[in-house]
Amino acid sequence: MASSTIQTLTTTFPIKEIFALHFLHSLSKLRRQKSFTGKTSERARKIKIAAYISMARATGGTSRRWSRAILWRLHRRAKARKILGYTKLKKRSSGADVGRIRRRRKDAEEDRLRTVVPGGGDMETLRLMMETAHYIKCLTMQVNVMQSIVDALSSA
Amino acid sequence: MENELFMNVGVSHPPEMTTPPPSSSSEMLNWVSMETQPMEPSLSRNLSRDCFFWEKSTEQSIFDSALSSLVSSPTPSNSNFSGGGGDHFVIRELIGKLGNIGEIYGTPASNGNGSGSCYATPMSSPPPRSMMATNASPLAEFSGDPGFAERAARFSCFGSRSFNGRTTNSPFPINNGSVAATVATSGKMTRVSSTPSLKPLTSQIPAGEYSGEVSRKRKVKSKDYSSFKASPSPNLSKEIEEKEDSDPKRTKKSEENADKTKELDPYKDFIHVRARRGQATDSHSLAERVRREKISERMKLLQDLVPGCNKVTGKALMLDEIINYVQSLQRQVEFLSMKLSSVNTRLDFNMEALVSKDIFPSSNNLMHQQVLQLESSSETLQLNPNISSNNIMDPLETSETRSFVSHLPSLTHFTDSISQYSTFSEDDLHSVIHMGFAQNQIRESNQTQSHTFQGPSSQVPSHMKAEL
């Protein structure tokens, strides 16, 4: 039973094409911005953000907490707090987890994992591991797509 | 002799044993289950007494007689088994019946007795019973297995207590004493065999599904049975050896359970979550153990994902590895984004065409067409990502975007909707944020609030950090 749930959870991996599409279009959009010819680090950061957002979107919605967290951070940064719908995003972490979380905080390794995986601040251990697995899958997919894009661009 | 045995157990139906032996195995099952029904509340006490009694008396003779009675009763009735493989066949048949008996033990519980234990240890919670029902099916499948007879013996000795929740057919009237006798004999037989062979059966009963309330009550009997270390009669020992040899599963499981070293309480917690020996058996610790097992499962899953982690064992080290891997992946993304930025400035931006050929090797025609459409219009529209997302998203998103856009992708329509976003600033981040905004709105709230986001467009912080 548990293995099946794990499989169902991890088989909802992001589709490469969707991610690539999002990413490319955001890149094209970025390119057309006038400020694109600024510092490389600035551009790189923006590209990275675009990549993460595309990845978050490519997961088929907000099925994963980390994707929601990434997008939610966007909204928070843009000071869109007046929209209540987004504050609900974060509150979805139920209070039932809180008690268990307090008990698990003593595990230092887990806390590191929480800081690494976005949106892992208030997830319990089991959930955190599932999200981590999915996140790793998405990250590898992202790296592959970006690598192929770079190769395609640099070669052509 | 049989009557004496049954009287010892405090059976209230001694004369039932004198009834003609059941003509079929089903009747034998009736016979067994009937006993268990009235026996439950008093069984523990009786058994404790009986155990001591048996210990004192000539156990071997009693067991022999009980066993022989069991063996003999079905044989004349059941013509199928007549003259089979000799001793072995008879034994298998007997064990098969014992296995059935084990199954039947569940019926009294399932029939609303409240307490599911056949040995007067009420299983209080329904869930274990329902879970045990699932065990009935694998056991049924086992019946075809040639090794089932041997395994069934062990099952039955545990099954007398463990298969309490079995939801089998309607209960049949059974003599208590005979049941106790059979169970005792089977228990003794299995007991005589080395304890590792006992443990495999305990592990066979699925571990993760039981809530574990009965474990405490089983201790009474376990202690009683543990006192039984009597030397087996030659017949029994021979039977035991026969059972022991044939099952490879048992040996494998005995290796798994090698950690169990205590000799004293073999039946301690064999009913449910496989509370291991020497471990606490209250519900908290059992749930804790289930949780830990789940965590270890997930860790194994993560191990598969992270390359080169097969040798690392242990939670802390594994977590270290995982964290390092995730961080390295993130660094890779950062590096690639930097590389992309440098590449972008150098080359013309015909990425879509390039990538659509590279990365979409097997994309469906719809996607291709939409991609091409979007590419053609990409210069005019700023919300390409939004369009593409509207076109090529998972069903959930597309439904919502459709609800938002109220139309399937047609570029002109999109331009209309996009014009709402005309207040874009030229900040890169801002556009990116709007991508996220629109998307999330479409996904989450299904409202037309996204255009309200145009207001804070000017407030988009240029200092937006990528602290992902």
Image (tube, coloured by chain):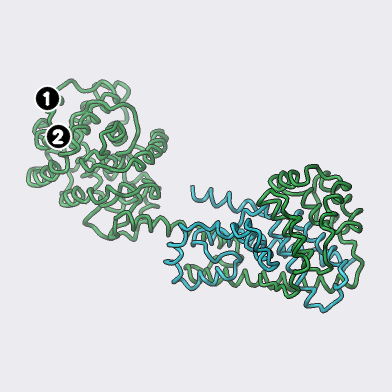
Chain colours: A cyan, B green
Q: Nearer the viewer, residue B362 or A14?
A: A14
Report if the CB atoms under discs 2 and 1 are less than 8 Å apart: no
Left or right of B389 on screen, residue B144: left
Indicate the quadrant containing the C terminus of chain A: top left, top right, bottom left or bottom right. Answer: bottom right
Give the residue drawn at x 25%, y 39%. B115
> In which chain is the residue bearing label 2?
B
Left or right of B234 on screen, residue B8: left
User: The residue tagged with tag 2: helix, strand or loop?
Assistant: helix
Q: Nearer the viewer, residue A75 or A129?
A: A75
Q: Quadrant of residue B306?
A: bottom right
Q: Nearer the viewer, residue B363 or A57?
A: A57
Q: Is residue B95 visible?
A: no
Q: Is residue B341 visible?
A: yes
Give the distance between the C-alpha atoms of the residues marked 2 and 1, in whole angstroms.
17 Å
Mark 1: amino acid? Pro
Question: How many numbered circles are shown?
Answer: 2
Q: Is residue A118 above or below residue B380?
A: below
> In which chain is the residue bearing label 1?
B
Any mark on residue B65, and which?
2
Give the residue drawn at x 53%, y 61%. A129
Residue B225 horizontal/vertical position (percent): 18, 48
Residue B92 horizontal/vertical position (percent): 31, 34
Mark 2: amino acid? Ser
Q: Quadrant of residue B62?
A: top left
Any mark on residue B262, and which?
none
Is disc 1 surrounded by few (<14), some (14 to 19) or many (20+) residues within 10 Å? few
User: The residue tagged with tag 1: helix, strand or loop?
Assistant: helix
Q: Nearer the viewer, residue B251 or B157?
A: B157
Residue hosting label 1: B15
Residue B291 horizontal/vertical position (percent): 42, 57
Residue A50 horizontal/vertical position (percent): 75, 65
